[in-house]
Image (cartoon, rainbow, N blue to C red):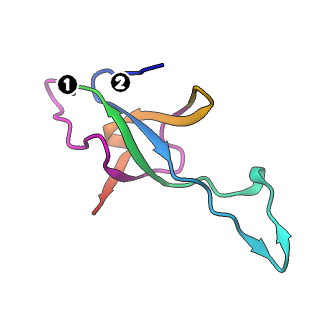
Amino acid sequence: MNIKPLADRVLVKPAAAEEKTVSGIIIPDTAKEKPLKGEVVAVGKGTKDEEMVVKQGDKVLYGKYAGTEIEIDGVQYLIMRQSDILGIIG
């Protein structure tokens, strides 16, 4: 399934959550921190007031509660406005 974000929306694939162990205790998925970085998979065309700065393939940082989680073909993605992106990782 292909998805093309509209206007100033961006489709981001979050980076995998890091496995952490504390003294041999494995932390369950529900207690893991959500990753705050990911890779841009697709971008919209922008609006007349906002030019799209991010492009496909960019590694980005975004806010903790940014975007809406969606699942496509069993893979988790976030769809968010470009303004929810805090920066591009160089």
Q: Is residue 68 magenta?
A: yes
Most common SS among magenta residues: loop
Q: Which amino acid does label 2 sit on?
A: Pro
Q: Looking at the image, do the residues carrying marks 1 and 2 touch, with CB atoms under 8 Å apart?
A: no
Residue 79 in percent (x, y) is at: 45, 32
Left or right of residue 42: residue 74: right
Q: In this view, does 10 lie above or below 17?
A: above
> How many labels sit on residues?
2
Where in the figure is residue 12, as x and y percent of width and height? 43, 40
What residue appears at the point 35 percent right and 24 percent down from the top-left corner? 5
At horizontal 52% and vertical 36% (from top left) the residue drawn is 77
Left or right, residue 73 beside residue 50: right
Position above or below: 46 against 64:
above
Instruction: Identify the residue at horizontal 62%, vertical 56% (top origin).
Output: 17
Q: Residue 56: which quarter of the image?
A: top left
- Asked if residue 59 lies left or right of residue 22, the reply is left
Query: Amino acid under label 1?
Result: Thr
Q: From the image, which quarter does the C terminus lie in?
A: bottom left
Which callout, 1 or 2, points at the residue further toward the start of the chain?
2
* Secondary element type, mark 1: loop
Q: Classify 88 as above or below 81.
A: below
Q: Which of 35 and 47 is in front in this view?
A: 35
The span shown in magenta is 48-69
**Mark number for residue 47?**
1
Residue 5 got which mark?
Answer: 2
